[in-house]
Amino acid sequence: MLKLEAVSAGYGSAQVLRTVSFEAKAGEILCLVGRNGAGKTTTMKAIMGLLPEMKGKVVVDGTVLSDLPSHKVPFYGIGYVPQGRRLFGALTVAENLSVGCLTNDKDTTVLEEVLRVFPRLKERLAQRADTLSGGEQQMLAMGRAMCLRPKVLLLDEPTEGLQPSMVLTIRDAADLMRRRGVAVVLVEQRLDAITALADKVVMLENGQVRGKLSRAQLASENDRLCDLLGV
Amino acid sequence: MDFGPYLMLAIMEGALTAAVLALTASGLALVFGVMRVVNVAHGEFFMLGAVLAWWVTQLAGGSPVLGFLLALCVVPVLVGMLAAFVDMTILKRINYDPERTIVATIGILYILQQVTLMTYGPEARPVAPPFNARIALPWIDMSDGTLRLYWPWGLSITSYKLFVIGAACVVLLGLWALMTKTKLGLLMRATEQDREMALAFGIPVQRIYAIAFGLGAGMAALAAVLIVPIQQAHYLMGGDPLLLSFIVVIIGGLGSLPGAILAALLIGLSDGIISIFFSPTLAKIFATLFVAFVLVFRPKGLWGTGKP
Ligand SMILES: Nc1ncnc2c1ncn2[C@@H]1O[C@H](COP(=O)(O)OP(=O)(O)OP(=O)(O)O)[C@@H](O)[C@H]1O
Ligand SMILES: [Mg+2]
């Protein structure tokens, strides 16, 4: 579904990613792990085409995304839940969701589906996004990305700073997306989440892929993973 | 004239200034809000609006009504298209870098000014107002305990000035509806909030920028078309609107449209009142002092909220 081929990218003069390659298949959760500053967020931005300089290829379903201008990328079914949520703060919940629906504005049922997954948002449709609680904001960030009926969903530390019950809500949503056949790329720091959710793990260090683990290898390679996560 | 009618007259003049200023400044505020750039050439788009209005009325020949209506419809669109073109060819190329945009728009300011001087000339030329009836206004007299309406000598306004105030209100309402009720408005507000996320959700930010820049310049041109029957078109007339728009945008909170409109009302009314009771120079001094106080004590603007 989503394939990165030798992606190198950075910000202006600073190169961050060096020949990163991995593949996420439909209906699986790929966990991208690495220490702070390893380049996880940069990888997400590279997939979205948001970096000024980039070499290599990002391919989704046979389309080379990296050749497109960045605003065309979501039209190929890439939903992005960025680190720190980055909602349109002065816009209402409803408006944030309709921005999410821009790429498929003929689809009239998706909004209802998303509100069924996150009923709390339904009660707050007219509220400004920046007045929501942290958990609600994260639900909105997820909902906004789910509105474009993604084939690939990029989740960058979606449970950072949330209370346990909210963490479960967000994880359930990620799992739901997987069951619907979405290729989910999840950046996660917590070992329990990785062992609970990951179908495969890609380990990133200093902008390079240091190793890949299948679900079966997770138990045996636990030490390496712990070492990488610094726990 | 008694104090009451005199004040009324000053408020009327102030309302006219406020109306035109609100249109011009909301264009500048829109550009700053959506694109986070300062358009120093904003006043020249205003000037271009006035000069083109003169040209269009000349081309239209005899009838002032026809010429004015034509100018009102055509000129803002022409100026808006020119601005969008400037955005796509110059500002895009320097990547909307804040400092370089200031320098680039200063350059554009001089180009527009000099080209106007070379083609239109240094004269100030009037445009005939489409209608200009004098309307006397009544005042209430309560001197002997009973209420009595009377028409004090000199308390009047022209029908054209009333039209300008009304037209400005309609256009500002339209702008508000555009920003809050339409899809284009949603796209502009989302881009204003977070450019990168706007891209990530499929908003063609480049096109939105060109539209916002064109719309902002079009607002200035529209204000100029409305005021030119009162003020005359001249190639140096862009300075004052630019300065006042800056003052208004700073007082209103950078990039905030409602803030800009409220601040235009405040500056316009105080300008009218101080000009009539004291002198126009004092009015400008007051506005400048006021903006200095706002910068010191409320740097986010009188009604500013969070954003820098
Ligand atoms: N806008 C930027 N300009 C220049 N360098 C940047 C920029 N954003 C990130 N970097 C650098 O790129 C490197 C990777 O950053 P990135 O945000 O991808 O890390 P991360 O793995 O997501 O870390 P974290 O776990 O803290 O979120 C860091 O060294 C960072 O300093
Ligand atoms: Mg990160």
Image (cartoon, coloured by chain):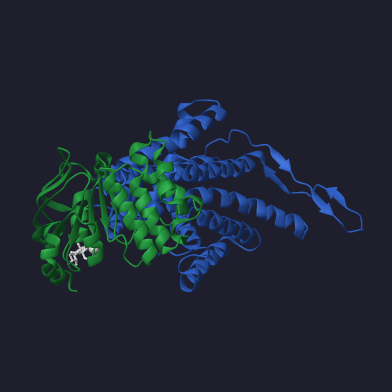
Chain colours: A green, B blue
The residue at the point 10 percent across, 65 percent down is A221
Q: Is residue B194 visible?
A: yes
Task: Measuring from the top left, give residue B196's x and y in whole percent.
Answer: 29, 53
Up-down relation of residue B300 to residue B132 (above or below): below
Quarter where residue B51 is shown: top left
Q: Percent from the top left, x then y, of residue B184?
A: 41, 41
A156 or A53: which is nearer to us? A156
How far from the left and from the top, in percent, is residue A153? 26, 49
The N terminus of chain B is located in which quarter? bottom right
Residue A49 visible in the current orientation: no
**Which is more toward the observer, A167 or B236?**
A167
Residue at point 38%, 45% (across, down):
A99
Q: Quadrant of residue A229?
A: bottom left
Q: Position of residue A144 (x, y in %)?
A: 37, 49
From the image, which quarter does the C terminus of chain B lie in? bottom left
Which residue appears at 49% of the width and 29% of the height?
A: B70
Asked if B204 appears above or below A169 in the picture, the reply is above
Asked whether B70 or A85 is in front, the reply is A85
Q: Toward the viewer: B225 or A146?
A: A146
**From the viewer's perspective, is B132 left or right of B304?**
right
**Is B273 on the left-hand or right-hand side of B226?**
right
